[in-house]
Image (spheres, rainbow, N blue to C red):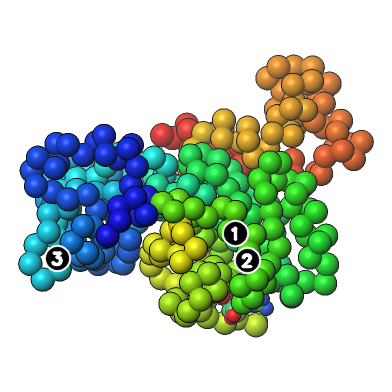
Amino acid sequence: MNLEAWGWTPFFTDQFPPFAQKGYLPARVIRGEKNYFRVICAVGELTVRFAGKLRHRADGRADLPVVGDWVAVEPQPDERGMIHALLERKSSFARNLPGRRKGKGQERIEQQVIAANVDLVLIVSGLDRDFNLRRIERYLTLVGSSGANALIVLNKSDLNENPLHCLEQVEQIAADTPAHLCMAHDPRQLEFLTQYLQPGRTLALLGSSGVGKSTILNSLLGEERQKIGAVSEAVGKGRHTTTHRELFMLPQGGILMDNPGMRELHLWGDEDDLSESFADIEELGASCKFSDCRHRVEPGCAVLAAVTEGGLNEERLASYHKLKDELANLQRRH
Ligand SMILES: Nc1nc2c(ncn2[C@@H]2O[C@H](COP(=O)(O)OP(=O)(O)OP(=O)(O)O)[C@@H](O)[C@H]2O)c(=O)[nH]1
Ligand SMILES: [Mg+2]
Ligand SMILES: [Zn+2]
């Protein structure tokens, strides 16, 4: 097992000496099911449990290992193991799990880390009924706060009469984030991904159920390793075929994480996270009459003027306000 090929870097080596002293091995969490985790390490793949101390020390779920994490593991007989420590993350992709209650009537907001140590997030959309610019803006904002880079993949180009028009619309909202069209069943159409693949680099597929995440993975692997499921004709949505997260080593080099489709995507972060995903609006805002302009009703607002003049899409501004309110609300409660 080559740790580097699985993404091990000096950033993790530097953290490991105290655990090496105890005889633990560095391991990466490659699969997370409801009841068990799998890691890969020098002695192969192990099914692991969390040490009690790790659970006790964890201050909320964010401190417990997730898929993509590097951990210190103690191998045990029968391909089992015990995770004793979680190494610091290079990046983590988190969402807000709202509505959890702690004690009597007290609403608790909780950060749910979805995946860790991802270098590049592939935001996958289907060009069928799934296509939704506002959702892409939401994903871009979330990835912007994660420490990872983003890439937009517009799949199912065969199901859209004008895929190039969709691509143009996406490019207008995506600023510097590259976007590509494809049809996942055809590996030749995924060749654009090779420029993003490199040994030890971790990519993750995110998007709604049914957009073709697992189909993309299978095409890159050249075999049907993940089950894929038909989209419901009645509602045009996927059926949540993939139910766990898992890392796969790609023959082209690089590691790809397949994920379950996301039902709800509540942001986790702060208002500054909009500065990348809505750089156009923030730039316009620099010319508003008031420096604290909220671009809603204020006089001399350059953003509202751009909407009137047609330079800025009204729905994009509404999307900005919605996400900003959501983040402000989160900050207030946190
Ligand atoms: N027409 C067309 N269908 C596609 C394409 N890519 C995937 N599909 C189909 O879309 C359906 C859903 O594909 P999956 O790969 O299971 O989607 P997923 O994103 O992994 O879905 P979940 O695991 O539920 O999150 C399957 O029937 C695929 O065959 C494409 O480019 N064109
Ligand atoms: Mg899937
Ligand atoms: Zn303004």
Q: Secondary structure at mark 1?
A: helix
Residue 80, label in figure: 3
Mark whose residue sits in front, 3 or 2: 2
Decide if residue 30 is on the left or right side of residue 274: left
- Compare marks 3 and 2 and give the one earlier in the sequence: 3
- Tag 1 and tag 3, C-beta contact below 8 Å: no
The x and y percentages for residue 269 are 49, 38
Residue type marked 1: Leu
- Compare marks 1 and 3 and give the one earlier in the sequence: 3
Asked whether residue 17 is in view, the answer is yes
Residue type marked 2: Leu
Residue type marked 3: Arg
Q: Secondary structure at mark 3?
A: strand
Query: Circle 1 sits on which residue?
Result: 193
Q: Secondary structure at mark 2?
A: helix
Furthest residue in direction right, as rendered? 309
Query: Circle 2 sits on which residue?
Result: 190
